Image: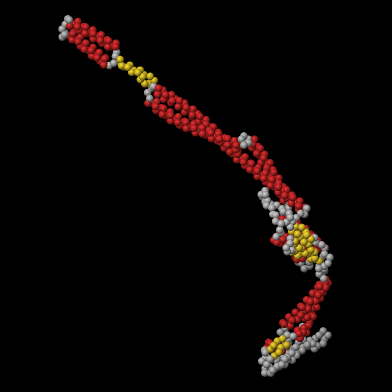
Amino acid sequence: MSDTFTNQGSKVLSISAKDILAIGFRRKRIIVMTFSAIFLGSLLLGILSPASYQAHTKLLVKRERVDPVITPGKDEPMMSHDDVTEEELNSEVELLESDDVLRQVVTATGLDSHRSLLSFGNANSEEGRIAKATTRLRAALQVDAVKKSNLISITYSSGDAQLCARVLNKLNETYIEKNTDVHRPHGQYKFFDQQAERYKQELSQVEEQLKQFAAEPGGASPLLERDNTLQKLSEFSATLDQTKAEMAATEQKIHTLEQQAGIVPNRITTQLRQTDDAAVLQQYKSTLLSLELKRTELLTKYQATYPLVQEVDKQIADTRTQLANEESKPVKEQTTDQNPTYQYVATELAKAKADYSALQAKSIATQAIVGTYRKKAEDLQQKGITQQDLLRTQKADEDNYLTYLKKREEARMSDALDQRGILNVIVAEQPVEPVIPTGSPWMTFVLGFVMAIILSMGAALLVDYLDPSFRTPAEVLSELNIPVLAAVPHYRMAASGNGNYGERLDVTPVVVGAGGTEPGSVQ
């Protein structure tokens, strides 16, 4: 780097190739040491590191096989979309890289047998080795979903060509098993078979209960008998109500007839005649005639004032009075007969009382019949409920039995398809043991050489930048901001490897004068 100073003391900085070479000469030891270390390391890495191999495989995700959805219903919805979505492909990729799949591959291929001297504590245990091997396997695997396709590409890198193919084969096998377990877990056939047998036994028990129930009185068709009983109960209830109504009417009739019987006479007059008493009148007339004849005879002998005549006159007057009384009171002849109204009332009253007694007996008998039919209807209703409950249980057990029988057959078909390998995931490209390694030692050498040059130059520039000493007049001017009149090289003596002295370590400019002069270009 050269600096040009003007008359006003200002500077113009410029970097040249000579300045860069000067840094190289000043820091040649750092450059040589850094270059040698990196390049020798790359040489050792290229010579000692084994060849790396890569194996490839591809999986095809499709939707040709449709499994029924497990639901408690008889009819299951069918998932029948042919396209495989990006989310489904990503799910399969995550399933491929899941810990349980990789751990099975590790234990099956022996990747966990590697022991590291740098591992401490639980790292050398079986679980620690499996965990480390799983991590290394995940780092060595490259799983990608191929865009605009249903393919999943898997690449595995290792120094053992046979191990590459073996790992990918085991990965495909384990993943397909895992995919089958995830999308259709095993054990469905056994579960459905157990449930079908269970409901078959329950169905047999319910049918046996129905058979025993039908053997009981009224157990064949209790609801039909209940309806007939209710109809008869309704008829007898109506008869009972009618009988009670008739009893009330008869009771009122009896009360009315009893009142009429107390008012209507038992007998009535049928004929009434008035006649004189002829015998009495004739006797009075005969007596009067005799007394008149006797008075006439006495008048012939005595005077009218004679006491005997007066006595006869008095007898004649009494006789005439009695005759007149008898003539004024004729003899009444009255004929009576039984009253027909009274007989009708009595007859109706007796008939009403007899009817009332009959109606009472009929009411009691009908009441007993109604109670019997009501009790029978209640028993039949309870039996009907029990029968309906048994029939519902039978229907539910039958439906469940047929449902699980169908699901068992579907599970058997799915198991058969799994055994035949008819899946929605197949290996589209089988892994092949690689023959040509993916890396070359010469490439390592070239990369090491380039990296050694870049890093050694960078180290030299960094050390030179961090060095606080002045090496050129320009640095003095830039830091102290004073003109430099002269620069004296400074030599430091240091012992070399062969014991000689006099090697120059750096050049330190020394300020000799300042101010007022017009400096020229100083290198």
Height in image: 29 above or below 87?
below
Residue in the image at 68% along x and 51% along y: 76
Specify whether residue 8 is in view.
yes
> Is residue 502 toward the left or the right of residue 80 in the image?
right
Residue at 21% x, 11% y is 316
* Residue drawn at 54 percent across, 32 percent down: 369
Q: Looking at the picture, how far across and down is residue 496, in whole percent?
A: 81, 85
User: How did the renderer colour the structure?
Assistant: secondary structure
Locate residue 47, reporting x and y percent: 83, 72
Residue situated furthest bottom in the rendering: 517
Which residue occupies the foreground of this view, 416 or 190?
416
Q: Residue 289: x, y in percent?
A: 23, 8
Above/below status of 210 relative to 59 = above
**Nearer to me, 319 or 117:** 319
The number of callouts visible is: 0
Point out the image quarter for the C terminus.
Answer: bottom right
Name which residue lies at 80% across and 86% down.
495
Q: In which quarter of the image is the N terminus?
A: bottom right
Please state the horizontal and vertical placement of residue 242, each as a whole percent of the image: 49, 32
Quadrant of residue 332 within the rendered picture: top left
- Image quarter of residue 293: top left
Task: Give 422 or 197, whichever is nearer the viewer.
Answer: 422
Left/right of residue 388 with respect to residue 147 in the rendered view? left
Q: Is residue 424 above or below residue 195?
A: below
* Residue 124 visible in rendering: no
Q: Which residue lies furthest to the top in this view?
A: 301
